[in-house]
Image (cartoon, helix red, strand yellow):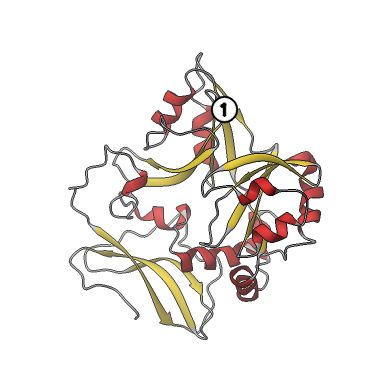
Amino acid sequence: MWSLDKWREHPGNPITEVAQCRQQAALFDFSFMSRARVSGVGARQLVNDFVSRDVSGMPENRVTDCLRLNHQGCVTSDLTVWKREGHGYEVMGGNDDDIAALMSQQSPNCSIEDLSDSHSVFAVQGPESLLRLARLGNLERLFRLEYFEFCDLDIADFPVRVARSGYTGEHDFELLVRRAVARALWCLLTQEFPVASYAAMDILRIEAGFILYCNEYSIGATPIEMELAQFAGEETDQNLSSEFKLACFTARHHECPVLWQHSKSNPPHPTRGEIVVISACFSRCPKRFSAWVISTQKMSPLGRL
């Protein structure tokens, strides 16, 4: 099991790991994710006020993507909200500041429990994920699990919460397990899945067109500009003018960017007419890299440069 800092120090062989994930399956450790449980009669209203999307109509055992916006209406991060039984919700995201902010909103009508240090988050992703998981026990429930649905079951006698979701665009599952048994489960999973690094995940999510909060959201763009208005709620004004345009391109380059991002102390601030790269990764094509870019409106459409 690896922390995000260790992944940055030891990126592994991301090109090989990407191929394994796309063609077969791979195992990722996402235990740097932060997570909190919100319970009580006031939980629904608190979660609704915290994210930009109405979660009132969520059925139990479902997951939905949500955004957090600042006072200027720009996206600062994305989160997943998990609907538990009764009045219960769970909120999970990659930015621990979000969970810290949620914890500060305790009220008499609901309780908030930080689960970040007591649970681990693993992901198995790739076209063979389901079949390989099924080798670990009687997991018929997984075959009926719909996308963005979760269930609680045992994997080799370990209680695990399994969600049909992921970050690669492939068939994938997220596994939430108590930290006390996480290492034992991890060792079991490595018997069926090769381990992949976060550098490989960065390539996979860029190829799939997915956004990483600490890269794309640093630009100060609205949900409409990030093409994420469907996750921002009905209150988002669809008629607002857009200053930025999100696009993807490939280009020839001699270096291999690994977990590339702008310095947090010097985020990009493009002006009209500029193109700013906000995510970059080495692709499977020799001497090419793929990237998300931010450009201004009224520029020519971006393609392969």
Q: Quadrant of residue 210?
A: bottom left
- Which quadrant of the figure contains the N terminus? bottom right
Q: Is residue 31 visible?
A: no
What amino acid type is highlighted by mark number 1? Glu
120 relative to 273, above or below: above
Would residue 31 be found to the left or right of residue 156 on screen?
A: left
Q: How many marks?
A: 1
- Which quadrant of the figure contains the C terminus? bottom left
Residue sitting at 40 percent across and 54 percent down?
218
x, y (%) of residue 241? 18, 52
Residue with the mark numbered 1 = 85
Q: Quadrant of residue 233?
A: top left
Residue sitting at 57 percent across and 63 percent down?
201
Would residue 192 be found to the left or right of residue 305 on screen?
A: right
x, y (%) of residue 28? 66, 58
x, y (%) of residue 229? 31, 48
Mark 1: which secondary structure? loop
x, y (%) of residue 58? 45, 34
Q: Residues within 10 Å of mark 1 (few under 14, many from 20)?
A: few
